[in-house]
Image: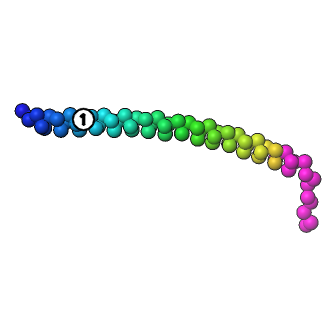
Amino acid sequence: MASASQMEQLVERVERLLVRYEELQRTNELLAEQVDLLTQERDSLKSRLAAARARVEALLERLPEIKSAA
C-alpha cells in the first residue's frame, strides 16, 4: 500500500489537475464567446458586402452602354 507521503503527493496532483481543468473550462467558454462574436461580425460584414454589391450593380445598370468602336 502507498505510504502517507505518496498519498499526499497523489492528492496534491489530483487537486492541481482539477484546478487546471477548471481553468481550461473557463478558457474554453471565453473562446466560444469570441467565436460567437466573430461569427456575428462576419455575418454582418457579409450582409453589408452583399448590399454594397447590389448597389454597385444597380448603378452599373444605370450607366449608358459604351459602344465599342469596331
The residue at 38%/37% (across/down) is: 23
* Residue interval drawn in magenta: 57-70
Pick the residue in front: 52 or 9.
Answer: 9
* Amino acid found under the numbered disc labelled 1: Val
Q: Position of residue 43 (x, y in %)?
A: 64, 39
Q: Is residue 64 magenta-colored? A: yes
The residue closer to the viewer here, 70 or 18, is 18
Q: Residue at x 23, y 38 (%)?
A: 13
Q: Looking at the image, which residue is at 28% across and 38% down?
A: 16
Q: Is residue 24 magenta?
A: no
Give the quadrant of residue 37: top right
In the displayed structure image, the side of residue 37 where residue 52 appears, left or right: right
Total count of labels: 1
Q: Is residue 11 left or right of residue 63?
A: left
Q: Is residue 18 left or right of residue 68?
A: left
| Quarter the C terminus occupies | bottom right
Quarter of image, res 22: top left
Q: Residue at the spot x=62%, y=37% of the render? A: 40
Q: Is residue 13 left or right of residue 38?
A: left
Identify residue for label 1: 14
Q: Which quadrant of the figure contains the N terminus?
A: top left
Seen in the picture, residue 41 relative to 64 is either above or below; the reply is above
- Can you say whether 18 is above or below 57 in the image? above
The color scheme shown is rainbow
- Viewer-nearest residue: 56 or 35: 35
Q: Position of residue 4 (x, y in %)?
A: 11, 34
Residue 10's spot in the image, x, y percent?
A: 18, 36
Residue that lies at the very extreme toward the left in this rendered image: 1
Q: Could you say whether the residue bearing mark 1 is in a helix, strand or loop?
A: helix
Q: Residues within 10 Å of mark 1 (few under 14, many from 20)?
A: few
